[in-house]
Image (cartoon, coloured by chain):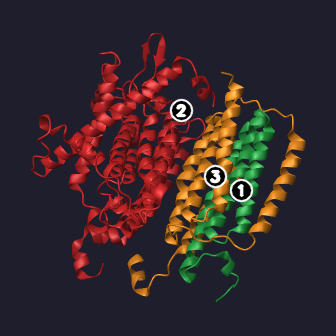
Amino acid sequence: MPIAYFLVLSSLLFCIGVYGVLARQNAVLILLSIELMLNAVNINLLAFSAHLAEAGVPGQIFALFVIAVAAAEVGVGLAIVILIFRNRQNVDVDEMSLMKW
Amino acid sequence: MNADVVREVFFWGVGAIMVIAALRVVTTQNVVHAALYLVGTLMGAAALYVLLLAEFVAWAQVLIYVGAVVVLMLFGLMLTRAPIGKANYDNSQRPLAAVVAAVLFGVMSWILIDAFSGTELELAGENAPRTQDIGAVIFSSYVWPFEIVSVLLLAALIGAVMIARRDEPEADKEVGS
Amino acid sequence: MNWVIDLIGGPQTVIAIAKVLIVFASLLVLMILVVWAERRILADMQARIGPNRWGPFGLLQTLADGIKLITKEDFRPQLADRWTYAAAPVIAAVASFLAFAVVPFGDEVTIAGHRIDFILSDLNIGLLFFLAAGSIGVYGVALAGWSSGSKYPLLGAVRASAQMISYEIALGLSLIPIVLVSGSLSTKAIVAAQAGSVQNVTFFDGIPVLESISRYFEYVPNWYIWSQWPAFLIFLIAGIAETNRAPFDLPEAESELVAGYMTEYGGAKFLMFFLGEYLHIVTVSAMAVTLFFGGWNGPAPDFLGWVWPLAWFLFKTGLFVYLFVWLRATLPRLRYDRLMWLGWKRLIPASLLWIAVTAVVNIDNAQLSRNWKLGAFGVMFAVVMVWVGKGDPRLRSAVSPQRRLDGTT
């Protein structure tokens, strides 16, 4: 099976994620788009890990690290979003252009 | 039936579901639906991991991403504002964002196909890494990254608690001491 | 992936489909029995009679209730989110079924030259699958609450998802010591490791009277419960919280949230939630049996062929289901902050500590000398002492009502 299949699929998902980050204004939806991008990276890592059979384990370990980092990112990101919501009753990033209010 | 054909069909089916779900994540006008479509993409990715002989990562993905991260997202959505029905969540940069994403995809896929066309993946799985191997390598060659990730998670945990914590009124503080 | 490819075509496909159908049907029948048993046991504990009209001892009452629910009008609240509202009960029921796929419920049997394992799918990462399936169950609850378009379900859903995520951590951590001692994530291998009886007990060597006791240990089954009882307690508490049963039934607390996330559900959809909850009880019970009580292993293994292990498995699982009902009849519901306190400040640290203890105990003596091990235990003991000594003011006020009356909290 050509490795290019997986690589193109993952780059497509990554670009959809890029579109989401740029086009959305709800902070939680931007976080969702970032998850899409991280996931695209994981597919890439695992495709190469299957390709380099003798070095297959490190690719999987990197994917596990990415999953762990994503979990940490979501934890902190959502905490920030909830704090902003508590102060402004709104999570639109376009309206967060002021550093103080 | 030929195993390669089965894999090919599997890939195209799962890939199509993933792409459609991902497109809906970034275009739907209902936040909870966006999170659910993301679940579709993540499950598809887990299925591809199984295809790529990484069963442990696949189930870790389902457990952590689908079971914890997206549930946390849903939780956040419900705590902020998640109306049933449609609302506008897009900003004015939509056309520009679409152009950027399309150009990026064109460049990336061109480079990737140029570099890796003709490279075949061997997915028969005689030497697929076992969970035991992953454990052994994490705790030998990758101990330092592992420790750094654990410190990162701890920092994120404390950070998240500190950020989201509501300042308690004075009267309540005595209870904790 | 390769097992999927092997499955397409050939007799293994037929066997796999047959197994899934048989197990599905048996679980449904089992559900009817479990619901009936719960109502009868609860009634007995409350000095009532319970369902007794339909069939012998009221056995068919549940079936009648099920038929009633299915034939009811299938309504949908006007504000509900159409597809999510319909999908949530299905997710809840399917997730509970999924978790059963990795439970070994008997020994293998050979029919017409084909070896048939009494397990739906012997994944080599079975425990991870069990946890993953459990975590999908959260979706059923969270989506049901959100999509109903009503405020009590939403509150119930927020409570439920917070509770289930919190206790999932303790549940997952309580499985790690089992993985450490058995060296496998496969449920089948874990059951195999618990076969036979306790061997080589050396505690009492050299002590005159007690030494003679050692030979009776050959009658004690080699279950993990003996060495892993702290992990078992954590697993049991977290498992009950995962199933949203009393005393952790806050998500559906009928006296404060009407019925929590399932307030707006009726008829067949309500039946799905109901089914999911009782299936979840059976799954958690079966998993407790598999991990800590030797699974289908029982005395006289060769007696009656394949029926005997299956009977033992059902018997042990039944005892746990009884425990679930017993707890419901006995314990009052926890307050929400106490629930969170128990999960985060007690169960998670306790399970982490127990992982450390199990890890140190299972290190080869050649790699780590006895003194180092004792030193490690000293540190752990100090941690426990600080932890217990510091306590929690809310716990102290809970155990001493007098102080609460004094207003000192």
Judge by depth and name the residue closer to the eye, C183 or C134.
C134
Q: Which residue is mark 1?
A: A37
Q: Chain C rendered in what hue?
A: red
In the image, what residue occupies the spot 55% across and 46% down?
A: C372
Q: What's the residue at 13%, 34% (across, down)?
A: C56
Q: CA distance from mark 2 to mark 1?
A: 29 Å
| Disc 1 packing (10 Å; few <14; some 14–19; many ≥20) | many
Answer left or right for A63 relative to B65: right
Chain displayed in green: A
Residue matched to label 2: C123
Circles 2 and 3 on the same chain: no
Question: x, y percentage for residue A93?
Answer: 67, 75
Whether label 2 touches label 3, CB < 8 Å: no
- Residue B118: x percent and y percent? 86, 34
- Placement of B136 over or under C332, stated as above or below: above
Question: SS at mark 1?
Answer: helix
The spot of residue A23 in percent (x, y) is 72, 68
Disc number for residue B73: none
Q: Quadrant location of residue A27? A: bottom right
Respond whether the residues carrying marks 3 and 1 are from the same subunit. no
Q: Residue furthest bottom?
A: A101
Asked which secondary structure carries label 3, the reply is helix
Q: Which chain is orange?
A: B
Q: Residue at horizontal 45%, vertical 61%? A: C147
Residue of label 3? B21
